[in-house]
Image: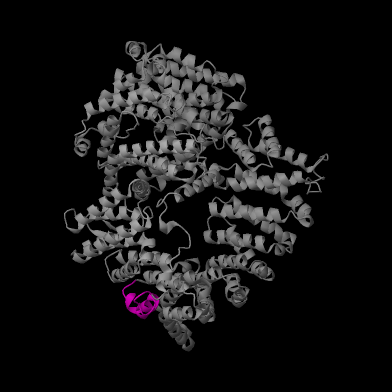
Amino acid sequence: MAAEKLRDLSQPMDVSLLDATVAAFYGTGSKEEWHYADFSEKHYLVRLKRTVLGTHLSNFFLLLWQRAAADHILRDLQNNPDMWLQVVHILSSTQSLNTKFFALQVLEGVIKYRWNALPVEQRDGMKNYISDVIVKLSSDEISFRRERLYVNKLNIILVQILKHEWPARWTSFIPDLVAAAKTSETICENCMTILKLLSEEVFDFSRGEMTQQKIKELKQSLNRAELIRATLATLHAFLSWIPLGYIFQSPLVCTILFLLVAYWMREQMLMCYTLEKLLNFFTAPAYRNLTLQCLTEIAALSFGDFYNAQYVNMYSIFMVQLQNILPSHTNFLEAYANGTSEEQAHIRVLESSQENKNLLLVGLEYLINISYVDDTEVFKVCLDYWNSLVSELFEAHHNLDSPAGNMMGFQTPMLSGVAEGLGSQIMQRRQLFAAPMSKLRQLMICRMAKPEEVLIVEDENGNIVRETMKDNDVLVQYKIMRETLIYLANLDHEDTEKQMLRKLSKQLNGEDWTWNNLNTLCWAIGSISGSMGEEQENRFLVMVIRDLLNLCEITKGKDNKAVIASNIMYVVGQYPRFLRAHWKFLKTVVNKLFEFMHETHPGVQDMACDTFLKIVQKCKRKFVLVQVGENEPFVSELLTTLPATIADLEPHQIHSFYESVGNMIQAESDPDKRTEYLQRLMELPNQKWAEIIGQAHQSVDFLKDPDVIRAVLNILQTNTCVANSLGTYFLTQITLIFLDMLNVYRMYSELISTSIAQGGPYASKTSIVKLLRSVKRETLKLIETFLDKAEDQQHIGKQFVPPMMDPVLGDYARNLPDARESEVLSLFATIVNKYKGAMLEDVPKIFEAVFQCTLEMITKNFEDYPEHRLKFFSLLRAIATHCFPALIRLSSEQLKLVIDSIIWAFRHTERNIAETGLNLLLEMLKNFQAPEFCNQFYRTYFLTIEQEIFAVLTDTFHKPGFKLHVLVLQNLFCLVESGMLTEPLWDAATVPYPYPNNGMFIREYTIKLLSTSFPNMIATEVTQFVNGLFESRADLSSFKNHIRDFLVQSKEFSAQDNKDLYAEEAAAQRERERERMLSIPGLIAPNEIQDEMVDS
C-alpha cells in the first residue's frame, strides 16, 4: 500500500507520493494524483457512490475521507523520530510549496526539542544546507520574489538554529551575514529580515516569554524606499538592547546599516555620521512612521545624565521638523480625519524634556490637541503618556512631603538645605507644567470613560437603555483615566474643583447641556473621590449634589431624567465620607433613591438599589441613631413605609433592598431593638411563608403548584440576603422557619427523584424540576450563609447540624446522581471548617453519605458534574485540615481511594479543582509526617506522588499550579533527606541491591524518571537538575528558580506564555503596588477600602 510505502523511512522517500498526500490533505490534489496514492479504502467509496449516494454528495464524502486519511498519514510521519533525515531529500526533490512547508515543520520540531541531542555532523550539515538554500534563493531577485513565503520559512528555521548555535558554536555568523549582504541587494534585504527576527526571538526570549514571529512581507518590487523601510524596521528591533554608545557616540546608522545595506546606498550612508541624520528620514512621508518608532524607542531608554545634551538636541530638531509638517495651529480633528492611513498611524507618541522649555510646551500642546482626536487607539497611546507624565510629577511632589523625604525626621542644616533646594526645583517644575496640566484636566473631564457602576447608556440609535454587556476595554480605559485624574487633582485641587464646577454650571444653565457632557463630568467627579481634604470635599460636594438635584427637578423628558438620575446615583455612591458627615444630605439622597426605585426606566431601579446598598454599607450606623431634629431612627421610619417603597421593584431588587436594611439592623447595638427591627423587616415574607405552610398542612399537593414553588424560592432568597448581612443576629429568624424548611426540602427532593426515575436524565432539564432544584439549592445556600456568617458558637452548630443529617446528607446518598445537589458538599465543608474538631464524630457519617457515590459521579471523565468536583475536594480538604484523626481510622482500601481521588483532582485541567487537590495533598503530606504514620504512608505513596507531581509539573496545561507543585516537591525532598523515614522506600523484591539511604535511591529514581520523560535532554543535564533539587531544597526561592530553568531547558515551555510560572512574584508585586496606591489620597476609591469606617 502507498501509506505503508510512505511510512517506510529505511530508504529515500517517494516524494511524488508525499506530494499527492499533502495535496489531498489541503484539498488541492487532482483525481489523478489521488489515484496515484491508491488507498484501498477508496474503492469502497466508489462503490458507495454508484449504489447509494448521488454524485455530488459522494464526491463530498470522498473528499472528507481523503483529507482524514492524509491527515492520519502526515501525523504518523511527523511523529516518527527519523522523519527529519528525509527533509533535505524532500526539499531538493519537490516543487510543491505545501510539501516544503510540511518538511520544514518536521525540521522545526527537531530543532526546538532535539537539536542538542543530535551528533555534531548532523547539526553542521543541516545548518549549512539551510544557509545555502537561503543564499541561493535570495541571490536572484526573480526567485526571491517568487519564493518569498518559502524564504521566510527558511529564515525562521535558521533563527531557530541560531538560538542553539550562536554565538558559542557559530561564532562567524555575523561576519558571514555581513559578507553575504554585500553581494546582492536582495540578499542584503533578506539579511536584515534575519537580523530583525533574531532580535525579536533571542533578545525578547531572555525576558521569559517567546515573542510571536513577526515577518514583514514586502509585496512591492525592490526599490530604495522599500529597502530603507526594511533597514529602519531592523534598526527599531535593535534599539532596545544595543549599547547606548552605539546610539549616541557613533555614526548610528553607519555602524549598523553600512554593513547591512547594499553597496548602492553607500553614498547616502556616508552622510549619516550622527543620530540627527536619522531625523532626516522623518520629513519623508514614506519613512515617517518607522523613523518615529525608532526615535520613540531611543527616547524611552534609561541613559542617565550623560547623554542629555544629545537627547535635547534630538528633541529640538524633531520639534522643528514637526512644526514644519504640522503647524501648531492645525485643526487636529480635521487633519486626522482627512489624512492618509500612514499619516493617521504616526500621530502616536511625543516625548518631553526639562530642557528647552518653549519646545517642551509646544510638544505638550501638540499632544493635548492630538488627544482630542476621535480615535480610540490614538487616545489610548496619548493616555499612556499622560498617565506616565503626571504620575512622575506627582511622585516627585509626594516623596518630598513624605517622612522619607526628610530622612526619617532627622533635620540638619545641610539636609535642610538640600530639601529646600529639591523643593524649589519641584515647585519650579510644577509651575512649568501648570498650564498644560490645567488643559489636561479639561481633556480628562471631557473624555472620561464610563465606570462599571453606571448601568444606563446611550445606544447606537440615541436611546437611553440599560447596559446589557460590560465593555472591558472601556473599564480598563476608565481605570487609567481615573488614576491620571487623581494625580492631577492632587497636584492642584483648586483648579480641578473650578473646572468641574464651571462645567456643571454650564449644564445647569443649558449652555453646554448634552447627555455625554453631563455623563463625562459626573464620572470625573465621582472618580476623584478621596483625593481632596475633608473640608474641601464637603464644600465641593455640597455644590455638586445641590446642582444635580436642581438639574433633575428642572429638566423635562424621561430619558433626560434617567441620565441625570444615573449620574446622581453614581456621584453620591462614591462619597461615603461626605454623606456620613452630613445627615441631611444623606437622608435627602436616600429618599431620592427611593423615588428612583419607582422609576420604571430600564436600569434606573437596578442602579438605585445598588447605590442604596453601597451607601448603607459605609454609613449604616447613621440609620439606627436618632438624628438631630428626628423623632425616631431612620431605619424605623423606613420599616414603617417598606411595603410602599418596594412596591414597584422586581424580586432581585427586593432582595438587594432587604440586604441593605439588614446591614442597618446589624449596626444596632441594642439586642431588643435589633430583634424588633428584624421582625418588622421579615413581616411580609413571614406572612407569606406561614400562609404557604398552612395550606400545605391541609394538602401537600398545594406545594406542587409552580407559582407556589416560585413564591417559596423568593422567600428563601430574601432570607439568604438578610442572613448575609446580619450573621449571628439572624438566629431568631432562621429558627422560626428552619424545621418547616427542611420538610419542604425533603418533599421537593422526593418529587425530583420520582420525576427523574420516571422520565430519565432528560427529566432533570424540565422547567418544573429545575424550579424544584432551585428551592433545594437556595435552602442549602441559606443554611450555609447563616452558619458561615454566624460567630463561632458551638451551640448554634449543635442546634442546626443534627437535624440536617438525614434530610440533607441521607437524601444526597439516596438520590440519583442527576438529583444530587453539589451545595450539600459545600455546606458540610463550611460546617467542618466552622466547627473543626467538634465534627470529628460526624465525619464517618459524612464519608458514608457522600464519598463513594460522589467519586462514582466525577471520575468517569473530566467534564460531567463540574460543580460537584470542586466542592467534593473542598470538603475533603476541610476534613483533612480539621478532622485528620478521622482519616487515620479509614481502612487501607479507603485511604487509597482518598489518595487516588486527590491525584485525580490535581490532574484536572480546571484550575480551581487542581489547586484544591494540591492544597489537600499538602495538608495530607504534612499530617502524615507524624512518626506513628510516616513510614507506612510514605512507603506506599511516596513514589506515586512524586511521579504524578512531575507529570503535571511538566504538562503545560497545568502551569497555574506551579507554585503548589514546587511546594509538594520541596516537601518530599526535604522529608527524604531529614532522616524521618527510617524504612527503605524501595521494594527489596524488585531492586537488585540495597541503597545506602533513601536519599540516594530517590536521586537515582528521579533521574531515571525524567530521562525517560525527556529523551531530548542528555543524561548530564537531567543529573545536574536532580542534584540541584537536593542541594536547593532548603531554600524555596532557589528551589523554585531551579525548577523554572529546567522547564525552559526541557523545551516543554519554551514556546509558551510562561507568566503562570511567575504568578507568586506577580502577586507580591501587585501587593506592593496596592500599598503604594493606599499612600496616595483617592487612588483607591473609598468604596474599595475594606475597613470599618467610623460612621457614628
Colour mode?
A: one colour
Between residues 689 and 991, which one lies in front from this camera angle? 689
- Residue 218 visible in the snapshot: no
Which image quarter: residue 350? top left
Between residues 922 and 759, which one lies in front from this camera angle? 922
Q: Is residue 495 above or below residue 195?
A: below
- Residue 727 visible in the snapshot: yes
Q: Assign the C terminus to one quadrant of the image.
A: bottom left
Q: Is residue 396 magenta?
A: no
Residue 748 locus on image (x, y percent)? 50, 76
Residue 644 locus on image (x, y percent)? 32, 78
> So how many labels did they put on this image?
0
Residue interval drawn in magenta: 627-649
Q: Is residue 633 above or below residue 128?
A: below
Between residues 664 and 768, which one lies in front from this camera angle? 664
What residue lies at 31% left-to-right and 39% top-to-bottom? Answer: 431
Residue 723 locus on image (x, y percent)? 49, 72
Q: Residue furthest front?
A: 413
Residue 848 locus on image (x, y percent)? 66, 68
Q: Residue furthest bottom?
A: 698
What residue lies at 34% left-to-right and 37% top-to-bottom? Answer: 428
Q: Is residue 811 left or right of residue 1096?
A: right
Q: Is residue 633 magenta?
A: yes
Q: Is residue 93 left or right of residue 437?
A: right
Between residues 536 and 820, which one lies in front from this camera angle? 536
